[in-house]
Image: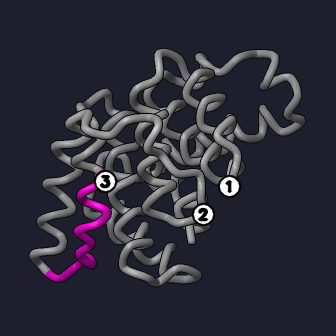
Amino acid sequence: GNGSLMRTAPYSIAYADDLEAIISHSLKSSAITHADPRCQASCAIYNLILANLIRDSPPFDAAVAAYDLATKQGDAPKSEEVMDVVTSVKTGEIQGSRLENSGYVVSTLETSLYHGLTADTAEDAIVNAVNMGGDADTIGAVTGALAGARFGASSLPDRWLSEIDETEEIRDLVTTLTQL
C-alpha cells in the first residue's frame, strides 16, 4: 500500500540537510503501518528526492547514492523494483501512458515522480496526476509535495489555496519544520 508514502514528506523539510536522518525517519515512519521493504524504500528515496528539490539540487544522483550507501551498510532495505522506477523516471524511459493509478506503492512512486518532475507547472503536475483517477487522493498528495518542492509554494494557484481554511496554519507548520 501507499499510505506511508503519502505521510512522510515532512521529513524532507525538517531534515533537508541531513540525508541519513531522512532515511532513518522515513524508514521508521513507514514501518509503523507499511513495513514492507518496497514501502520503506519508496518513502526514503522519495524524501531524499524531495530534500534535493528543496535545496535546489538535482533530484536523483545524491538521493540514489545516499540510499545505496544505506543499503550497503545494512541501514535500509533493498528494493530493486523501487530503484528501477527511479532509474526509469530519471532516464526518461517511462512514458505517461504506461503509468498506473493504483494504491500499489511502487506505482504511486513512479506516477508521482513522473508527473511531479516532468510537468511544466505545479498545477499541471497535480491536475494530471489526479485526473488519472484510481487512488487519486494519495497520488495527488505525493505528486503535490514533489511539485511544491520543485516549483515552490508560491506556484500553487491562489484559487486552490483560498479554498483551504488551514492555509496559514500549514505555512506556519512548514516554517517550524524548516527551523528544526
Residue 154's x, y, as percent?
60, 17
Q: Which mark is residue 103?
A: 2
Instruction: Please report whichever mark, 2 or 1, sits nearer to the chain's N-terminal start.
Output: 2
Residue at 36%, 62% in the rendered image: 44
Instruction: Please state which of residues 31 and 132 is positioned toward the viewer in this rendering.
Output: 132
Residue 115, how many percent across, how many down?
48, 34
- Distance CA(mark 1)–CA(mark 3): 18 Å
Q: Which residue sits at x=41%, y=49%?
A: 110
- When asked about the image quadrant of residue 24, the answer is bottom left
Disc 2 from disc 3: Cα separation = 16 Å
- The amino acid sitting under disc 2 is Gly
State the residue position of label 1. Answer: 135
Mark 1 crowdedness (10 Å alpha carbons): few <14, some 14-19, many ≥20: some
Is residue 11 in the magenta section?
Answer: no
Read off the magenta span. Answer: 74-85
Q: Position of residue 64 (x, y in %)?
A: 19, 53
Q: Which mark is residue 10?
A: none
- Residue, x 54% and y 31% (percent of image)? 148
Residue type of the residue flagged with mark 3:
Val
Q: Which is more toward the observer, 49 or 172?
A: 49
Q: Which of these two is toward me, 87 or 27?
A: 87
The image quadrant where one finds the N terminus is: bottom right
Looking at the image, which residue is at 58% across and 21% down? 124
- Mark 1 element type: loop
Q: Are marks 2 and 1 in contact (CB under 8 Å)?
A: yes
Question: Which of the 4 image quarters holds residue 25?
Answer: bottom left
Q: Nearer the viewer, residue 95 or 26?
A: 95
Q: Which residue is mark 3?
A: 85
